Structures are given as C-alpha cells and as structure tokens.
Amino acid sequence: MIDPHVHLRDGAEREKETLEHGLDVAWRAGLDGVLEMPNTDPPLAGRDAIARRIEDADRAVAKLGIGIFHGIWAGLTADPAQIEDVVRCWAEMRPRVAGLKLYAGPSTGSLGVTSVEAQRAVWRRLAELGYDGVVAVHCEKEELFARRGDGSPDWDPARPSSWASARPPESETASVEDQIALSAEAGFRGTLHVAHVSVPAALEAVVQARRDGRRVSCGLTPQHALLSAADMDRPDGLLLKTNPPLRPADMPGRMLEALLAGAIDWVESDHAPHTLADKRHQHASGLPVLPFWPGFAAMLRERGMAPDLLERVTHEAACEALEVAVESSGREPDPGLADEYPFDPFAR
C-alpha cells in the first residue's frame, strides 16, 4: 500500500511528530510508501528545503532499517519564479519530488493561494513551463466561508460541529469547479488531482470533467468516508477538527459508496498529527490517521471491495499517476500499532 497524502511534521514542529516516527508508524501500518505534503515548517517550496528534507528522510529510513519509499509534493505559491523553481525540482528530482501541491483554500501553514486571480496565474505559469505532471489541490473557496464581523471564522469551539458550517460543502464544490475551469483555460496539460474530496457534488464535478476528456483524479480519506460533522459533538469531538471539515451526516456514506464503486481514484489519509494541547486549546486541524490504515483496508474488504479494486485504490492508481515505482514488501501490519494511540478517531 502507498499513502499519497501525509503530513510528517518535524523541523520546527518536532513536538508534533518527527520524520523518523512518522515513517516508522507508516511502515508498521503496512505501507510501502508515503508522499508528504509541503506545508511543513519550513515549507517544502524551494530547492534547498526539499533537498534537505530528502536527506533527512533518507537518514531516518536508514536509522530505522526499513524499506519504505518517501516522496514529496513540492508546494506552489503565486510567485512565477518560485513556480519555475519547483517545476525544475520535479524534473530533476523525480520520483522523490512526485508532484506539486496547490492550496486553493487556507489550511495549516502559509502556502495558501486563495484568490481566483492568483490561482489563474499559477495554472498559466504551469502551462507556460510545460509542466505535465500531477498538481494536487486543496479545494475550498475562502470567500464562501462563514465569517464574523471581524473576519474570523464563524464557529464555536464549544460546539465543534459548527466548524462544518463555517467551511461549508459549497465552498469545496465551487473550488473544484474553479480549478477545473482555470486549468482548462490555461491549457494545463498535466493531471489535476482533487485532494481529500468530501462532497458528492464536488465528486460529480470531477466525474463530469473526466467525461469531457480532462485528466482529473481525486482521493478520499477514511475520515471523510466514515465520520460526519455530528461526530464532532461527541466527547472529545474537538479532536476531529480537520480541513476540509467533516461533512453533514448524509455525505460520508455516499463518498464511501463512490469509493466502493470505483469512482474515486485512491485512498489518502491526510495524516496530520498535533499535540493534544494544540488540538484542545489552539483548535488545530488534522488527525493522526496512519495507524488506522490497516483497519480501513480491512473494512473495505469486509464491504465487498474486489481485490483488484482494493489494490488499485491503495497502490496502483497513485503509482501510475505519479510515475512512482513502489514494490510491495508483503508484510503484515503490526497488530499492536493502533493500541499505542490514546484516541481512535474511528471508535464508536
């Protein structure tokens, strides 16, 4: 299995997780490869930072004595020179730099490119440079967020599920539609990947784009397949805060059914650990999902997913799209891994 969407922290965020710890957990969970997102501290949005990260990951893998593949999504900004730099990194450092990441909605870190005009400029620059790889996009349209008079998010931490209405489903769908249109307008020749799709209408936009002959893919997380906004109002539900938010109760089941039907390209965890203090007091967004990969894969088997489709959504599709060769080690996951975590987001 490969997880194409993880946040491994380290650097200035070592108190949350280290590269060594994250890679060890992934390996013990039965994963043979992970691709990490660039909103680290410092961000993976330039040659020097990316090269250092690859060296650090290689040292961690050697120290652990494991065979896991580590790759990176290089971060995009609206700066044309920076875009050119990471496109060159992709061309010269593949497969370790497997693709590029655009934050079309705000999330953890400082890489957000949230205005439509800035996004248009990014797609145009990528087309001018002849980039034909994968761009993974965090799709949430900020102007559709619910805001208070002072501009802060309109939500109440005492009622955690209000995070779902602060960043509503419509914001994701509108952003997906924007990215499909903007990339087409620019003449982008690569693949647009919608990360952590969570809204049926957004998935419908992806499916329609494929029918129109576009190279568009999407990934689904376990949390957006199994949990709803209502789960955030159970005890310690504030720990379930994530971006994009958990959705209304009717949506996760529909997304899971779409995965089982083969309409979603791959599973991605969006593993994003924080300290408990960050979650409870700073209201940080993100869940530690890597330990629960084996349970999610087992659930898909129990729900009747055919072995060839399971292989595709947990390995083949991402490897093909990103041109990454990750061989299976044939290991069984460590059965004691999940027991080490005090909070299981999927426990009922």
Image (cartoon, rainbow, N blue to C red):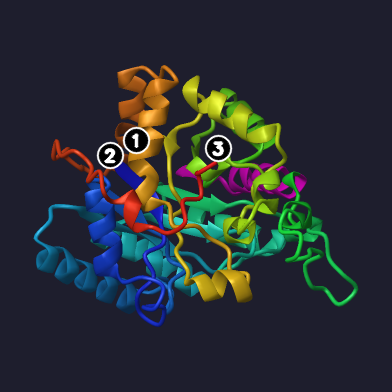
Q: Where, by quadrant of the figure, is residue 43 drawn?
A: bottom left
Q: Which of marks 3 and 1 is nearer the N terminus?
A: 3
- Marks 2 and 1: CB-CB under 8 Å? yes
Q: Find the distance from the CA under tag 3 to the CA under tag 2.
A: 20 Å
Q: Where is residue 23 in the image (x, y as percent from the top left)?
A: 26, 60
> In the rendered structure, which amino acid carries the disc numbered 1?
Thr
Instruction: Please name the residue shown 79% across and 60% down the image.
Output: 143
Residue 193's place in the image compared with 281, above or below, is above
- Marks 3 and 2: CB-CB under 8 Å? no
Instruction: Please name the residue shown 13% across and 40% down the image.
Output: 329
- What is the count of numbered marks? 3
> In the rendered structure, which amino acid carries the disc numbered 2?
Met
Q: Where, by quadrant of the figure, is residue 110 drawn?
A: bottom right
Q: Find the distance from the CA under tag 3 to the CA under tag 1.
A: 17 Å
Q: Name the residue under label 3.
A: 226
**Boundaries of the magenta span:** 170-193
From the viewer's side, name the closer residue of 176 and 301.
301
Q: Where is residue 105 in the image (x, y as percent from the top left)?
A: 64, 60
Q: Is mark 1 on a helix, strand or loop?
A: helix
Q: Name the residue under label 1.
A: 314
